[in-house]
Every structure is written in structure tokens, then in C-alpha cells.
Amino acid sequence: MFVGVVLVAFTIAAFDPYRALLFSPILLGAPHALSDIWYLLVRDSGVPLRVRVALAAASGLILLNAGLVLFGWKVGQHVDSILLVSLLAIPMALVVPANKAVPQWATVAAFACVLLATSFPLRAVVAHLHNVIALIFLFTLAWPKWRKGGVALAVFVVVGLLVFGMALSFTNVAVFAKPIASPSWSPFLSLTFGAKNGVAGALLFSYGFLQLLHFAVWIGFIPLLKGDIEWKKVGRAFGFGLPILGVGVILFTVVAAPLSAMIDPLKAREAYLTLVSFHGWMEIAWLLAHSAQLMASKEFSLRKTFLFDAAGA
């Protein structure tokens, strides 16, 4: 089934990339963000509660700040960057001291330096990166449950179609080859890091294709692998504000985005990305905290780093 979804995502990204980049976040963004929050912060028993509380609190502040920006409130130039650094650093500090997880703290320091001291498009890097993280989550969870050959085939198909589509983007065969220079593509060009022509087309195809898979992973495949959602657990989350975070995401993206999309889909997409972009950073923060915890207990491995809620996997 996953291979079928991959083929559909490739077809959409290759033959109608503009609409894929424009409408998929509006239609699929909110459900996938809620699933991401649910499985990493509510259902995960592999990371201490205090770490998930910190992730939820920092994410909530970032969401609040994004909402203020969206409605025209003026905030400090570095407020968003400081909040993102806090999102990475605070959960780490609650897990282990710096001297017991040097690689993770070095990563946090690198993120902080780039965010606070340069104009490097780090947010675009994270946008691309978090699509890949979702696939690694999926394959890690699927390894003990699917046939090993099936997981290997899924990886092969994803990588093969990704390389094939990016290669096509350098030719006149690809849909991306010509229209990318038109003004209508300008909302997506931040994802190309200033590249031109075929390179820009390849980067946009990669993002569009992997973004569709990212949505499918969090909306469909991770819930499938993790079992039925136990809604009674929502009540327990009130202790650290996750329902408030979830309601905020619902109000701004499930309700407001489709309504505004009828009038101006570009503004609806921008509003969604403004409000929910924190979740990619949340995934990275969760990985850093989880891997640091494993390293401190001398149980670190790449697979364990990505295997959340080990008891339920």
C-alpha cells in the first residue's frame, strides 16, 4: 500500500507540482501536524514527561508568537529565533548535562549560531529535512512489523523516484523546467536557496514529492503502525497544555485556512506555514532529546533514536 501512495505522490508532484505545493498544506497540513503532536508528545512513553511538557510549552509559545505576527503585531526581530533555540535547548537540558551528550549539544549550538548570527536560510533547510525525518520514523517503526523485503522495497522506490524526478527537472521533459521562472512560483522560491533553472526545479520537485509522503506518513501510516488512537488519553494531556496547542492548530488551520483558501489560496498557505512551521523544529528537538537520553544511558543506536514509544512499537 505504501508503494502505491509513493507512486501517487510522484505523479502529482511531477505533473501538477504547482497545485501540489499550493493546496496540499491547506488540505492536509493541519491533520498531519495534529498527528505529529499526538504521537510524539502525548503517546510517546520513551521520552520523559517533563521533556514532552517542555516541548509542548515551547511549541505553544512559538505558535502564539506566529499568531501575533499573522495578525500584524510587531515583535522583536530575534524573538522567533530565540524561541526556536529554546525549543531545541530546554528539552535537552532536562535530559542530560552537556558533557554527557556532546554531539547533540554541538548540534543545538550550531543551530543557535546560524539562527541568531546569520541570514542563512536555515528554516528552508529544516523544511526539507523534516520531510526526510518522517520517512525515517516510518521505516524504523515498520521494520519489525512489515516484511523486511517490503521495507527495503519501499526505501528503494522512494529513493529511486526521488532521484528520477530530480534528474528530469534538469530537462525540458519536466513540468518544473519552464514555469519556475514565472512570478506565480515566487511563493515557493525560498525552498530553492536562490538556485536557478534545473537546480531550483529539482529542489522544488524533491520538496513537493517528499512533503506529500510526509503528510501520508503522519496522517495514515504512523497511526496504522501505532494502533488505534485512545482518545481517553487526551484528558491526561490537560496537565501540560497539549489540548490548548491542538485547539490552536485546529482553529487556525482546519477552520481558517480552508475559508481563506476560497478567497486567496496563497495567503492561506502562507498563514498555515507561519503558524505550523514549529512542528519541524519540534521533531528535531524530540530527536535530540531522545538520542541524548539514550547516549547518557549507553543505549544509543540510530534505530532506537527514531523508535518512539518503544513499548508500543
Image (cartoon, rainbow, N blue to C red):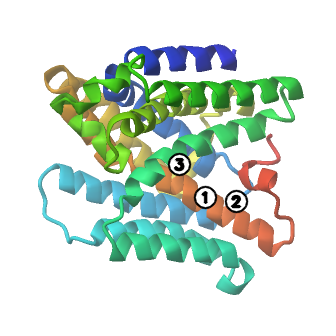
The span from disc 1 to disc 3 (Cα, nearest Å) is 14 Å
Label 2 close to label 1 by CB (< 8 Å): yes
Foreground pick, 111 / 268: 111
Q: Is residue 75 left or right of residue 9?
A: left
Residue at image location 31% in from the left, 49% down from the top: 194
Q: Earlier in the sequence, mark 2 or mark 1?
A: 2
Task: Give percent across and percent down for residue 268.
Answer: 23, 33
Mark 2 surroundings within 10 Å by alpha-carbon count, few (fewer than 14), some (14 through 19), many (20 or more): many
Label 1 close to label 3 by CB (< 8 Å): no
Q: Which mark is residue 286?
A: 1
Q: Amino acid at mark 3?
A: Leu
Instruction: Give the labeled residue for mark 3.
Output: 129
Foreground pick, 193 / 295: 193
Mark 1 surroundings within 10 Å by alpha-carbon count, few (fewer than 14), some (14 through 19), many (20 or more): many
Q: Earlier in the sequence, mark 3 or mark 2?
A: 2
Label 3 close to label 2 by CB (< 8 Å): no
- Residue 111, visible in the rendered structure: yes
The span from disc 3 to disc 2 (Cα, nearest Å) is 22 Å
Mark 3 surroundings within 10 Å by alpha-carbon count, few (fewer than 14), some (14 through 19), many (20 or more): some
Residue at image location 74% in from the left, 81% down from the top: 100
Instruction: Give the labeled residue for mark 2.
Output: 47
Q: Amino acid at mark 2?
A: Val
Q: Is residue 52 left or right of residue 138?
A: left
- Residue 234, visible in the rendered structure: no
Q: Quadrant of residue 155?
A: top right
Task: Give percent across and percent down for residue 66.
Answer: 27, 54
Q: Secondary structure at mark 1?
A: helix
Q: Is residue 190 left or right of residue 15?
A: left
Q: Is residue 12 left or right of residue 263?
A: right
Q: Amino acid at mark 1?
A: Trp
